[in-house]
């Protein structure tokens, strides 16, 4: 039997607690045999990339076969999620259990809380999304160096990671036909020095697309000042 750890990057914020509770309950329903772990690190501000790396590190230390890196506001569907877990064990790519990322926003989230099925809730489709839920083995995660912990606060780590995965593993993450649904909460501030730094770093990743040597150097640079959780 495949041992699965669901690792949820999580630093409590009042307007997001409800989404974390809904997300955790859904995963417990979809994966009753999995174990669950909230993950935070010492980074200030919050570092989603570091939490994902730490989740995989803890999964590896406890000898889980697969780690599901689950954002605390994103709800997967059962079929694509289980298909991604099964496939992740047998190949060398990270798996995304969706081909369509739906942002429920405030109205769609209210509809879901009132009992409407997820697929019938009002939603905005985010084209090209590559976040929300990752399914991976520790070996595959570290084969492309995980995610860059220089991405602090909001934004950029997912796009950079996608470039690194595609360049170093020779293919983009594998997708499974289906949807994920992002619950509404207050958006992070999308301005300031850190925001600009994040997207300047994303630009460097995009410049390294298709060049494994340059990509490895960029990722190695990003591991120098990693903090311990």
Image (cartoon, rainbow, N blue to C red):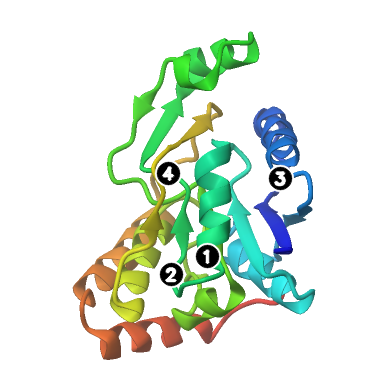
Q: Assign a secondary structure to mark 3.
A: loop
Q: Residues within 10 Å of mark 2 (few under 14, many from 20)?
A: many
Give me the disc on residue 98.
4
Pick whichever of labels 2 and 3 is earlier in the sequence: 3
Is the N terminus in the top left, top right, bottom left or bottom right quadrant? bottom right
Per the image, the residue denoted by label 1 is 88
Q: Residues within 10 Å of mark 3 (few under 14, many from 20)?
A: some
Q: Is residue 220 above or below residue 183?
A: below
Judged left or right of residue 188, residue 162 is left
- Counting from the top left corner in percent of width and height, residue 187 is at 49, 34
Residue 103 versus residue 176: which sits nearer the camera? 176
Per the image, the residue denoted by label 3 is 31
- Residue 117: which quarter of the image? top right
- Residue 198: which quarter of the image? bottom left
- Counting from the top left corner in percent of width and height, residue 183 is at 55, 29
Q: Residues within 10 Å of mark 1 (few under 14, many from 20)?
A: many
Q: Are marks 3 and 1 in contact (CB under 8 Å)?
A: no
Residue ID at (78%, 44%): 32
Per the image, the residue denoted by label 2 is 93
Give the Cα separation between the discs numbered 4 and 1.
14 Å
Residue 199 versus residue 139: which sits nearer the camera? 139
Q: Are marks 1 and 2 in contact (CB under 8 Å)?
A: yes
Pick whichever of labels 2 and 4 is earlier in the sequence: 2
- Counting from the top left corner in percent of width and height, residue 213 is at 28, 91
């Amino acid at each position: 039997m495949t041992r699965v750890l669901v690792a949820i990057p999580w630093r409590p914020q009042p307007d997001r607690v409800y989404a974390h509770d809904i997300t955790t309950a859904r995963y417990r329903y979809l994966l009753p045999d999995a174990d669950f772990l909230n993950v935070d690190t010492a980074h200030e501000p919050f570092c989603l990339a570091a939490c994902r790396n730490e989740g995989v590190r803890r999964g590896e230390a406890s000898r889980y076969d697969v780690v599901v890196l689950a954002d605390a506001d994103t709800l997967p569907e059962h079929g694509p999620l289980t298909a991604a877990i099964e496939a992740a064990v047998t190949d060398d790519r990270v798996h995304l259990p969706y081909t369509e990322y739906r942002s429920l926003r405030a109205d769609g989230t209210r509809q879901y809380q009132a009992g409407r099925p997820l697929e019938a809730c009002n939603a905005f489709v985010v084209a090209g999304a590559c976040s929300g839920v990752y399914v991976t083995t520790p070996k595959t995660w570290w084969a492309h160096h995980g995610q860059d912990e220089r991405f602090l606060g909001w934004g950029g780590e997912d796009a950079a990671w996608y470039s690194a995965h595609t360049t170093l593993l020779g293919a983009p993450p594998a997708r499974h036909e289906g949807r994920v649904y992002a619950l509404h909460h207050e958006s992070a501030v999308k301005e300031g020095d850190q925001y600009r730094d994040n997207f300047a770093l994303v630009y460097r990743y995009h410049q390294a697309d298709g060049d494994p040597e340059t990509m490895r150097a960029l990722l190695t640079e990003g591991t120098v000042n990693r903090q311990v959780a």
